[in-house]
Image (spheres, rainbow, N blue to C red):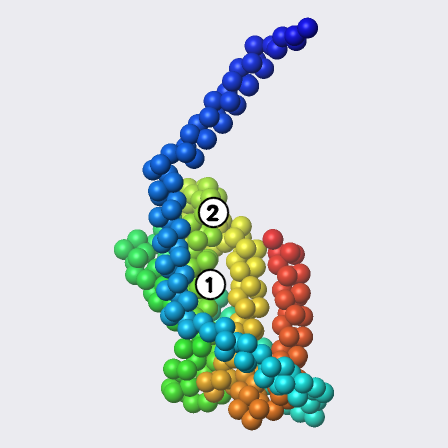
Amino acid sequence: MSVSRPPSARVSVTAVQAALARQLGGRASPGRRLRRAALVVVLIVLYGLCWQLAQVDLVKLADGLPKLGHWLAQAWPPDVAELPLFAQRMGETMAMAALGTTAAALLALPMAVLASRNITPFPKLYYPARWLLNALRGIDSFVFALLFVAAVGLGPFAGVLGIALHTWGSAAKLFADHIENAGTGPLEAVRTTGAGRGTAIVYALLPDLLPVLLSTTLFWWEFNVRASTVLGVVGAGGIGLELKNSMDLLDFSRLFTIIALILVVVTLLDQLSGWLRKRLV
């Protein structure tokens, strides 16, 4: 005894069968198979070229792993005799990140207003502002620090300037994106009362965006603490200076202590930054 299906069920089954037929037909299409084969060939060639340019050598890796194991064995036990010095250098690193990030955030806010298409007071400066931010973002803080070491001499101040310039471009770009994606209803409402553009931005737009802007600033502070640990390699002070000295002297127990200290501090800052961002958003 056959069970008759309602018309809606028959239509649904027919629609599903038609969709499956189209899918299978598409897969069997010679043109689609040819495009997929061409894409696979392009990817193979691209990654083969990258392999050559990166000079990947698995034989060297296999030969070097025993050396790495020997160095790790020499790193134990860690050398804690200079722990007060390491703590001071780590403090310099955190100070560089804090000052550089704060200066960058303060500079980024007015630049973000200028680089936001929906609220910029000078539309003709929109693209030049964006180009400047792209230039600052395109040069790493490591390179900036190297340049400022030549300008202001060795020490953490060069690191502060390097971090500030790179973070200025990166943070301002993110600020501008947040502003462009925000609704301008409150801003226009305040403008209708006769308030100026600057007053409307300060009292109508920024209060709504402040939590996400502060969260972005915290992210960059956390990132800069990690990034500034290597600025000492170019003479910009901080824990990176001791890290480089230990590597130059092949003092692996001292190097292990420095790396362990960096990991502990960065982990704690990650937790603190994450907790603060949750409270802001």
Front one among 187 and 95: 95
Q: Hey, which residue is sitting farthest left in the picture?
A: 124
Q: Give coordinates of residue 87: x percent, y percent.
A: 65, 85
Q: Camera-side residue: 131 or 6?
A: 6
Disc nearer the start of the sequence (1/2): 1
Type of amino acid at the residue the image marks with label 2: Ala
Q: Inspect the image, locate mark 1, and give the three-letter code of the amino acid beneath it.
A: Ala
Among the 4 quarters of the image, the one containing residue 30: top left
User: Is the C-beta separation of discs 1 and 2 under 8 Å?
Assistant: no
Badge 2, how many Cα within 10 Å: few under 14, some, many 20+? Answer: few
- Distance from disc 1 to disc 2, alpha carbons, whole Å, reads 17 Å
Relative to 54, say whether 156 is above or below: below
- Element type at mark 2: loop
Can you say which quadrant of the picture contains the N terminus?
A: top right
Report x, y in % for residue 52. 38, 69
Describe the element under mark 1 as helix, strand or loop.
Answer: helix
Local crowd size for mark 1, using a 10 Å CA cut-off: few (<14), some (14–19), many (≥20): many
From the viewer's perspective, tell me whether residue 213 is left or right of residue 52: right
Instruction: Left or right? Give the position of 129 relative to 242.
Output: left
Q: Residue at x 30, y 53 (%)?
A: 123
In the figure, 250 relative to 119: above or below? Answer: below
User: On screen, 153 above or below 187?
Assistant: below
Please name which of the two marks, 1 or 2, marks the residue nearer to the observer. Answer: 1
Give percent across and percent down for residue 208. Answer: 53, 50
Q: Nearer the viewer, residue 67 or 150?
A: 67
Image mark for residue 171: 1
Residue occupying image coordinates x 44% and y 44%: 184
Residue extending farthest to the top is 1
The residue under label 2 is 182
Q: Is residue 256 visible to the viewer in this orientation of the structure?
A: no
Left or right of 215: which side holds 133? Answer: left
